[in-house]
């Protein structure tokens, strides 16, 4: 026995060390718990700040974009005078087509004057033509198209629902004020007095605007007529090209690199380049598409086919990386068990590994498509931004090859136009684009849950 042991055994000199209780925290434990509480608080604060910004963004989008889904319309009984539209009276469609939109403007002037007279509204203008400033310039073309489609209407008085002018629509939406009209040459306060009286009489109404969702783009002078429908169709054809090309190519490349390719410097180089391509700015793919598909292959500019090919190049790295991650997540025991019972390498991959990796593959593919759907920079390089999508394609072939626009390109085009009504429509287009993106992400979640298998 040592002296120290003997002294301790005999209760010798030295202060007695207090026994620590497991129910009492020492100073070090208190500091550690305090640090953990601070870290949790920082996380809650960060999450709260993120939610505040997200709510503010959604509020701004909804507040600025919701008015685009409604439009101000004027209900006018227009007398389709036979003397002006069909002087011969034989209903020859070729003769009726010769009457331009200028020939329909007097009919609209008379209809507005008649509407004021029937509702007891005094006109502040000496010239009846000044009243037509309340109506969109597209009204004459709308009436002309209907007359050409139904020539038997000539000689009758037909009630039309025509678009109000952009300033009138902005006035009822709060976008245009009487003070701002002092600097506006298109409209003045007397027009707004007439518009208020017509609204009280029920001639002017604000209704849901299906043409914004289903219609085509318009010139810069007719924002009230602009719609995003044709651009939606252009995005659909582009996404179809991306899906048909990127999914089989990306999945096949991933399966080969992950399951069959030998591990050497060449495959390592391919994997590094795929990872680098996923981080390349999207506008670089637009330059590549301009050089290869338009200048070298002579494909039509602004066509959804070219846009789809460019977005396919941009989406492939994302799909390959996500697919390889899904294949890696399958336990090696699945492969070993398949090979152990006599399956070939291909059978083990396609019959066992691939079905288990399918949820991740589908999720990565849909997320890649959603990313491609919102891209604008590559489309700018191939001419889809400056194109005015004013007509629907005639068929499937023209849908791929005819010039068109896309939803993000259309939103960009509206945002840079001068009229405030187009700014409103840009916000409305963002709402529609977000609905598409949310739908695609919801589909990805549903497919993941549907095909998910646990082991």
Image (spheres, rainbow, N blue to C red):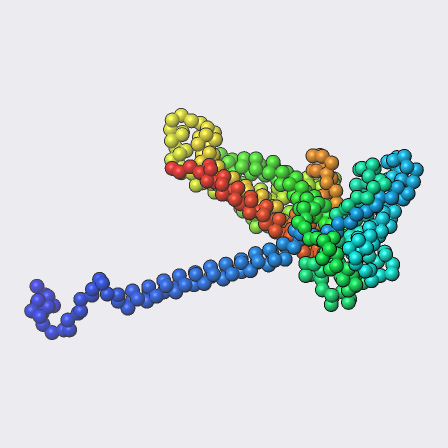
- Residue 152 visible in the snapshot: yes
Nearer to the camera, 121 or 376: 121
State the quadrant of the C terminus.
top left
Nearer to the camera, 308 or 185: 185
Q: What residue is rendered at 85% in x and 56% in y?
A: 129
* Residue at the farthest left position: 10
Relative side of 347 to 71, left or right: left
Q: What residue is rendered at 51% in x and 35% in y?
A: 256
Q: What residue is rendered at 40% in x and 29% in y?
A: 339
State the quadrant of the N terminus.
bottom left
Compared with 115, 188 (above or below) is below
* Residue at the farthest top position: 342
- Residue 223 visible in the snapshot: no
Residue 149 screen position, x and y as percent: 80, 37
Compared with 45, 163 (above or below) is above
Q: What residue is rendered at 82% in x and 39% in y?
A: 153
Relative side of 390 to 271, left or right: right
Residue 240 screen position, x and y as percent: 63, 38
Residue 363 screen position, x and y as percent: 51, 42
Numbered label tally: 0
Q: In which image quadrant can residue 167 be found? A: bottom right
Compared with 211, 355 (above or below) is above
Relative side of 139 to 289, left or right: right
Residue 102 screen position, x and y as percent: 87, 48
């Amino acid at each position: 026995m040592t002296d120290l042991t003997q002294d301790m055994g005999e209760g010798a000199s030295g202060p007695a060390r207090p026994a620590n209780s497991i129910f009492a925290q020492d100073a070090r434990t208190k500091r550690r718990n305090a640090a953990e509480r601070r870290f949790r608080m920082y996380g809650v604060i960060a999450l709260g700040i993120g939610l505040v910004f997200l709510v503010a963004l959604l509020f701004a989008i909804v507040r600025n974009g919701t008015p685009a889904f409604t439009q101000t319309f004027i209900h006018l009984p227009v007398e389709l005078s036979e003397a002006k539209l069909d002087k011969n009276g034989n209903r020859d469609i070729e003769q009726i087509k010769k009457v331009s939109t200028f020939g329909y403007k007097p009919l609209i002037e008379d209809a507005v004057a008649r509407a004021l007279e029937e509702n007891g509204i005094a006109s502040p203008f000496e010239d009846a033509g000044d009243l037509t400033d309340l109506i969109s310039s597209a009204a004459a073309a709308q009436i002309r198209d209907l007359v050409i489609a139904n020539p038997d209407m000539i000689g009758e008085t037909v009630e039309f629902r025509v678009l109000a002018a952009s300033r009138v629509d902005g006035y009822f939406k709060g976008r245009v004020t009487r003070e701002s009209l002092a600097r506006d040459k298109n409209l003045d306060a007397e027009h707004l007095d007439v518009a208020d009286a017509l609204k009280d009489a029920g001639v002017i109404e604000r209704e849901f605007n299906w043409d914004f969702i289903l219609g085509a783009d318009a010139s810069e002078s007719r924002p009230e007529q602009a719609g995003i429908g044709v651009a939606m169709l252009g995005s659909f054809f582009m996404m179809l090209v991306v899906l048909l090309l990127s999914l089989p190519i990306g999945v096949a490349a991933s399966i080969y690199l992950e399951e069959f390719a030998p591990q050497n410097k060449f495959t390592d180089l391919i994997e590094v380049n795929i990872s680098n391509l996923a981080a390349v700015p999207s506008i670089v793919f637009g330059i590549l598409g301009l050089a290869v598909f338009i200048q070298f292959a002579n494909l039509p500019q602004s066509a959804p086919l070219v846009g789809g090919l460019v977005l396919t190049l941009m989406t492939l790295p994302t799909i390959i990386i996500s697919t390889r991650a899904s294949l890696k997540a399958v336990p090696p025991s699945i492969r070993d068990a398949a090979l152990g019972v006599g399956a070939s390498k291909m059978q083990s991959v396609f019959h066992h590994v691939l079905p288990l990796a399918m949820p991740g593959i589908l999720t990565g593919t849909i997320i890649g498509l959603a990313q491609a759907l919102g891209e604008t920079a590559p489309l700018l390089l191939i001419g889809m931004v400056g194109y005015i999508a004013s007509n629907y394609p005639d068929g499937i072939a023209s849908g791929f090859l005819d010039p068109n626009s896309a939803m993000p390109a259309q939103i960009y085009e509206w945002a840079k136009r001068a009229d405030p009504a187009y700014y409103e429509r840009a916000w409305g287009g963002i709402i529609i684009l977000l609905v598409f993106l949310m739908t695609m992400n919801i589909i990805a979640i549903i497919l993941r849950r549907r095909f998910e298998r646990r082991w």
